[in-house]
Image (cartoon, grey):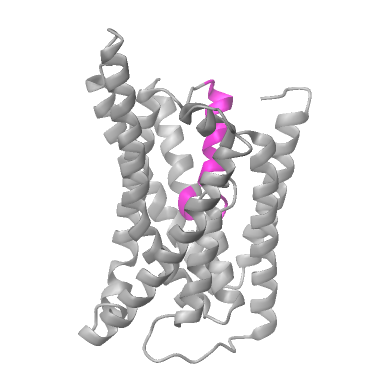
């Protein structure tokens, strides 16, 4: 894998991970266009580092806002902690069982690696992108009609009800690549009465909470693959991939900062619905790429 491939994937990941357009959908398409195998240990290592880079971009971008709101006092932090724990519990309670049901029914008998590849199928990514696009479009249009009439809350966080709905929809995003996490959670928050600023701030706080678990899962997959290769007498040399992966993390971090500024700007200017239109167009493009004459 060349430096060019690493930088390109880092920029795609950094932008799409934090914009409400589904990073997994874009990364899957980019990997297929570049002829890369996402199941290789080198690609797994790169994806771990790219996720880490975008997580630090979120922390760097929102830290001042979080410090002013969630960490302004012990009481404010307690309210935030209760809500983010509640949302994360719902994410796990909904997302994990769905993933297990899919694995044991639709992908019964397949190995973990095969399941990962099946989840990345473009014919499954396309409808997930379409659903995310419709949800974003609905939230954006309703936001224009509401003109700022939001449920009043004590403090500067979302309500328990709003946090619950956002956590629940985040759980639905986990098994389905193409169903944008940020797009779905922010849109859901807006639809249940949260202001767009609070929905955005809380959505990315939830992301920072679950990202270490996602990175840990990928790192565990990397260790298992490395151990299996060593046992088979063909050890994998990842040392050469570490520096390029660190470079990828840096570019993902920088692209993530650009994406967050773009996202916040369009939210503030009432252009959220445009991300929904993009997802619908992207869904159509992915469908054509899968079923068209140049099938990927």
Residue at 55 percent of width and 63 percent of height? 169
* Side (left or right) of 246 relative to 279: left
90 and 10: which is toward the camera: 90
Residue 158 occupies quadrant = bottom left
- The residue furthest top is 233
| Residue 120 shows in this picture | no
| Residue 233 locus on image (x, y percent) | 27, 7
Is 151 left or right of 73, judged from the image as shown? Answer: right
> x, y (%) of residue 106?
63, 37
270 is higher (above) or lower (below) than 5: below
Q: Which residues are magenta?
A: 17-35
- In this rendered view, identify the residue nearer to me: 103 or 75: 103
Q: Is residue 33 above or below residue 120?
A: above
The N terminus: image quadrant: top left
**Residue located at (34% from left, 66% from top):** 62
Residue 118 position, x and y percent, is 58, 32
Name the chief secondary structure element in magenta: helix
């Amino acid at each position: 894998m060349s430096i060019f491939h690493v930088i390109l994937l880092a920029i795609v990941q950094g932008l799409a991970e934090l914009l409400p357009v589904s990073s997994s959908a874009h990364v899957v398409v980019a990997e297929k266009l570049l002829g890369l195998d996402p199941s290789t240990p080198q690609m797994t290592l790169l994806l771990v580092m790219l996720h880490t880079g975008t997580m630090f971009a979120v922390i760097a971008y929102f830290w001042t806002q979080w410090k002013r709101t969630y960490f302004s006092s012990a009481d404010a932090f307690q309210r935030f902690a209760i809500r983010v724990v509640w949302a994360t519990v719902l994410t796990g309670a909904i997302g994990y069982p769905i993933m297990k049901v899919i694995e044991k029914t639709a992908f019964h008998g397949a190995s973990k690696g095969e399941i990962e590849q099946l989840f990345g199928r473009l014919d499954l990514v396309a409808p997930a992108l379409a659903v995310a696009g419709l949800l974003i479009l609905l939230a954006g249009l309703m936001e224009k009609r509401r003109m700022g009439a939001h449920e009043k809350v004590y403090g500067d966080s979302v309500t328990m009800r709003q946090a619950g709905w956002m956590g629940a929809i985040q759980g639905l995003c986990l098994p389905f690549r193409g169903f944008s996490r940020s797009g779905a959670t922010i849109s859901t928050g807006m639809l249940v009465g949260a202001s767009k600023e609070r929905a955005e701030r809380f959505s990315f706080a939830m992301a920072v909470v679950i990202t270490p678990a996602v990175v840990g899962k990928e790192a565990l997959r990397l260790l298992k693959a490395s151990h299996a290769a060593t046992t088979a007498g063909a050890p994998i040399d990842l040392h050469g991939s570490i520096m390029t992966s660190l470079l990828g993390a840096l570019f993902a971090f920088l692209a993530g900062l650009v994406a967050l500024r773009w996202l916040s700007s369009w939210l503030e200017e009432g252009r959220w619905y445009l991300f929904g239109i993009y997802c619908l167009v992207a869904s159509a493009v992915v469908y054509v790429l899968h079923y068209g004459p140049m099938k990927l």
